[in-house]
Image (cartoon, rainbow, N blue to C red):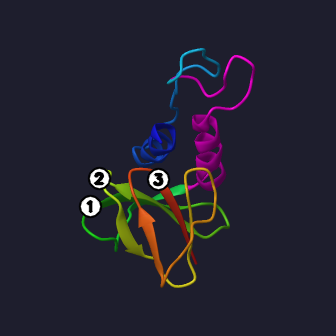
Amino acid sequence: MFVAKAYAEGIALGLHGLVYYALKSEHRLTGLLRPDNTPRPSYLAFKTAAAFLTQARYRGPAAGYPVGIYGHSYRPQARKTVDVIWTTDGAPRSVLLPSEAAAFDRYGTLLPVSEGLITVDYGPVYIQKP
């Protein structure tokens, strides 16, 4: 979760680079790859963040979400607007998905929508809006 949030926050802060530990590490909580080159969950989260946010222009704080939801809004080149959101305290909250929007988890998996609602918690959610 950290790497995806750091990616989103780095763009919002106007950083030109962001270092996330080593590419490979034997330590459980660091590195994007295991020593045998298999991806850790953090690698998959980084890959998803890069897919949604590479060459994206920061638009400002994500707006229109319930209290306790934090995030940023971006405009990738020639693509739909993307909001990256998560809860500030880790507690799950229901969020009404904007019309014609789609929501993806930190690994890029399409989230289920029930009566227009998705559940957001501490893990970042990417919302693509028209």
Residues at marks 2 and 3, CA–CA distance in whole angstroms: 11 Å
Q: Residues within 10 Å of mark 2 (few under 14, many from 20)?
A: some
Q: Please name the residue that numbered disc 1 is placed on.
A: 68
Q: What stretch is highlighted in magenta?
A: 30-56
Estimate the x, y position of residue 42 in percent, counting from the top left: 57, 36
- Residue closer to the observer: 15 or 88: 88
Residues at marks 2 and 1, CA–CA distance in whole angstroms: 5 Å
Q: Are marks 2 and 1 in contact (CB under 8 Å)?
A: yes
Q: Callout 2, which amino acid?
A: Thr
Estimate the x, y position of residue 73 in percent, counting from the top left: 45, 62
Estimate the x, y position of residue 34 in percent, counting from the top left: 66, 22
Q: Please name the residue that numbered disc 2 is placed on.
A: 88
Please tell me whether mark 2 sits on a helix, a strand or a loop: loop
Q: Does the magenta stretch include residue 78?
A: no
Q: Callout 1, which amino acid?
A: Gly
Please name the residue shown 63% across and 36% down the image: 43
Q: Is residue 33 magenta?
A: yes
| Placement of 41 over or under 123, stated as above or below | above
Please tell me whether mark 1 sits on a helix, a strand or a loop: loop
- Residue closer to the observer: 86 or 50: 86
Q: Which of marks 3 and 1 is nearer the N terminus?
A: 1
Q: How crowded is mark 3: few (under 14 residues within 10 Å), some or many (20 or more)?
A: many
Please name the residue shown 55% across and 51% down the image: 106
Tag shown at residue 124:
3
Residue 129: image quadrant is: bottom right
Please tell me whether mark 3 sits on a helix, a strand or a loop: loop
